[in-house]
Amino acid sequence: MLCGRSYPIAWPKFKLRQCVPEAEKEFKVTTNYGRVILTQKTAPAALTEPDNTVINGINLVTLTARWEHAGVPQSKQIQFYVYRSG
């Protein structure tokens, strides 16, 4: 509210579509420190409830960054889950 009045907000409209994520993508990024290769891997997460009910729609995403420092290969990796309703 501004000065006792409410102003409507124009929210953007999104069209959601269901799609299967790519299993693997690779991006090459040039930086001031050299080239970094970013790899994204996606796979269905094998998750189950305590009563052995399979949980669907959750993917495990792994991001890996690879680069060289002084000629020695370096890398860092993170993993997280993404929910896709379906």
Image (cartoon, rainbow, N blue to C red):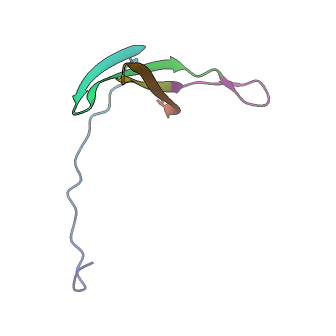
**Residue 35: x, y in percent?**
27, 23
Looking at the rendered image, the quarter that the N terminus falls into is bottom left
What number of labels is visible?
0
Q: With respect to residue 54, does 10 lie above or below?
A: below
Tell me what residue is drawn at x 64 percent, y 20 percent.
46
Q: Is 72 in front, or is 52?
A: 72
Tell me what residue is drawn at x 72 percent, y 25 percent.
53
User: Is residue 40 in sight in this rendering?
Assistant: no
Where does the magenta region start and end? 47-60
Q: Is residue 69 left or right of residue 50?
A: left
**Residue 23: x, y in percent?**
43, 13
Q: Is 66 in front, or is 64?
A: 66
The answer to which quarter of the image holds residue 5 is: bottom left
Residue lying at the far right of the rendered structure: 51
Q: Is residue 21 left or right of residue 52?
A: left
Q: Is residue 65 left or right of residue 57?
A: left
Q: Is residue 36 magenta?
A: no
**Residue 8: x, y in percent?**
22, 66
The answer to which quarter of the image holds residue 50 is: top right
**Residue 79: x, y in percent?**
52, 30
Q: Is residue 57 magenta?
A: yes
Q: Is 11 in front, or is 26?
A: 26
Tell me what residue is drawn at x 53 percent, y 25 percent.
60
Residue lying at the far top of the rendered structure: 23
User: Is residue 28 in sight in this rendering?
Assistant: yes
Residue lying at the far bottom of the rendered structure: 3
Q: Is residue 60 left or right of residue 21?
A: right
Q: Is 67 in front, or is 15?
A: 67
